[in-house]
Amino acid sequence: MLEQSTTTESINSAIEEKTIEICLHKGMLQGIKYYWHQKHQQTGIKYSLRLAKANVEALLTARGLINAVKKPKTQGWVIIAIILLSIAVAIYFYFRTH
């Protein structure tokens, strides 16, 4: 029984280390996806995505690495700028032809 719990702990430790490595190199979303997938494979039970996210954040926070992780970039301002520029060009050409 002790051997089985040690093996499970080493598997969990390996998953956690790999998760942290993935988070640092590829970003938080990829790390959560990896952790979620590995836990699902390990237990055979559908693992909650929210729980996986909370666990990954707790792992990173415990090691002081939460600020070192790449955050997903939002490109919303680029889309807004393109739309506004398109509207401005349309208005310009409309009044130029009339």
Image: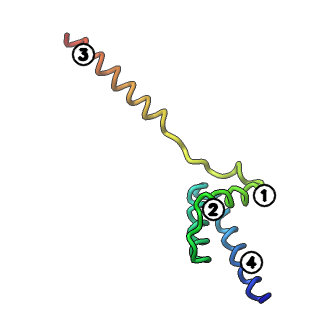
Q: Is residue 81 left or right of residue 12?
A: left
Q: Are marks 2 and 4 in contact (CB under 8 Å)?
A: no
Q: Amino acid at mark 2?
A: Ala
Task: Indicate the position of residue 1 as horizontal and vertical percent values.
Answer: 77, 89
- Secondary structure category for the residue under label 4: helix
Q: For the residue carrying disc 2, how many other residues have a C-alpha within 10 Å: few (<14), some (14-19), or many (20+)?
A: some
Query: Which is nearer the N-term, disc 1 or disc 2?
Result: 2
Task: Provide the residue designation for mark 4.
Answer: 9
Above or below, 28 relative to 10: above
Q: Quadrant of residue 25?
A: bottom right
Q: Residue at x 39, y 25 (%)?
A: 84
Q: Which one is nearer the viewer's eye here, 61 or 98?
A: 61
Q: Position of residue 89 (x, y in %)?
A: 31, 21
Q: Position of residue 95 (x, y in %)?
A: 25, 11
Residue for badge 3: 94
SS assignment at label 1: helix
- Report, in whole angstroms, how far the alpha carbon at label 3 lies from the one at label 4: 69 Å
Q: Secondary structure at mark 2?
A: helix
Q: Which residue is mark 1?
A: 62
The span from disc 1 to disc 3 (Cα, nearest Å) is 59 Å
- Alpha carbon of mark 2 to alpha carbon of mark 3: how far? 53 Å
Q: Nearer the viewer, mark 2 or mark 3?
A: 2
Q: CA distance from mark 4 to mark 1?
A: 18 Å
Dot 3: within a 10 Å radius of its alpha carbon, few (fewer than 14), some, or many (20 or more) residues? few
Q: Which mark is residue 52?
A: 2
Which tag, 2 or 4, sits closer to the chain's start? 4
Q: Residue at x 60, y 60 (%)?
A: 32
Viewer-side label of 3, 4:
4
Type of residue at label 4?
Glu
Rate crowding at label 4 as few (under 14), some (14 to 19) or many (20 or more) other CA atoms within 10 Å. few
Q: Secondary structure at mark 3?
A: helix
